[in-house]
Amino acid sequence: MAGPLAGMKLIEFDSMGPVPLAAKLLADMGVDVLRIARAGAADRAGGADLLRNRAVVRIDLKSPEGRETVLRLLAQADGLMEGFRPGVMERLGLGPETCLAANPRLVYVRMTGWGQNGPLAARAGHDLNYIAITGVLNAIGGADRPPPPPLNLVGDYGGGTTFAMIGLLAGVLSARETGRGSVVDAAMVDGVAALSSGIHGMMKAGEWQDRRAENLLDGAAPYYRCYTCADGKYVSVAAIEPQFFGLLLEGLGIEGTRFVQRDRDGWTAMEATFAACFASRPRDEWAEIFGPTDACVAPVLSFAEARRFPHNVARGIFPDTLPAAAPRFGGVPGAAKQASEITVEAALSRWRGPPHRDMTDPAALPISATDE
């Protein structure tokens, strides 16, 4: 299956996590991605799977010849994605102004943590720092301990990768309509803040307290949290709606009228009762009890266990070392291809003709033999 984005061409400048994941996800959907890496540099250890499904060419970006090669490649591309600190691409002679002069339809995506401007723009940082200044990190975890690092899913990948992809695709759609490219400032702080829009809306409505473990979705509610089971493993409970709460009580063997779900005065007793119930059986027994119901209870699995979980197996979510392509477009994701290294000459001949054109424009339609 070629993928819904077949025909789109993207230049990826080699960088860390968020950019490679964006390029990988786009390649999974059919984008022809060419990764440009530094001449003589080896790929980072352990990152081979994230670099699959696309070719790489190694170019000396500090040489005039290397810069010229990149501009020739960009003349045939729909998009560019880079993840350097602000000013690095300009110093290489490959800033937005230069690249859009070579290809006015180019969508130039700049992925950073802090953004292209602001007091912190030139400073180093990582996921935990980016989510810290947005207020999101402070809302995660128990009230009696420092906030825990939520892996690097929120900042790097949620606020970074996701919004860089959105920006690229929106820019390409606009370029096909207008013939004009754009520069996308994809900052993780912007993306994380945008992801928290719902919480800000609840705060405005007086439905969210700006403190940890005080709210419906942050672990304060006994029916929206995790519990320890008899074997030391965990279950997740998310019985928010009244009908699901009723099924939770039923599965735990608790009288349906014992607790009033939204009565905060009873939450301490509710939590203690739920904890004692879940501690009476091992996790997988609870999974069997609640699996056929709508109580919104699911086992908390390790990464290794997730690969064997029946639902995940049935959907083919983990076909190999990486999860399957997402989202799905009417079929099973295709098999992954390993990254291939190509020469500069092969890179220049890889794409023939201009970037993908708006095929709704009669002037953009190819001339057939019968038209001559």
Image (spheres, helix red, strand yellow):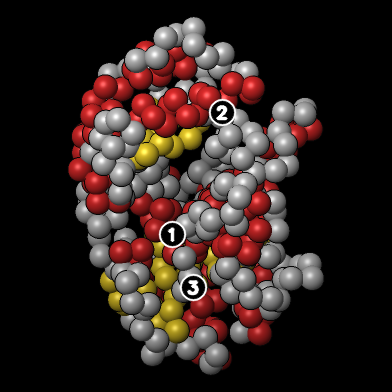
| Residue in the picture at 41% in, 36% down | 227
Can residue 345 be seen by looking at this rendering? no
Name the element at disc 1: helix
Residue beneath disc 2:
268
| Residue in the picture at 43% in, 37% down | 226
In which quarter of the view is residue 134 placed?
bottom right
CA–CA distance between discs 2 and 3?
48 Å
Q: Label 1 neighbourhood size at 10 Å, few (<14), some (14-19), many (20+)?
A: many
User: Which circle's residue, 3 or 1, is located before the other in the chain?
Assistant: 3
Residue beneath disc 1:
21
Q: Amino acid at mark 2?
A: Thr
Q: Amino acid at mark 3?
A: Ser
- The mark lying in front, picked from 1 and 2, is 2
**Percent x, y for residue 183?**
67, 61
Q: Is residue 285 left or right of residue 136?
A: left
Of residues 264 and 223, which is closer to you in this image? 264
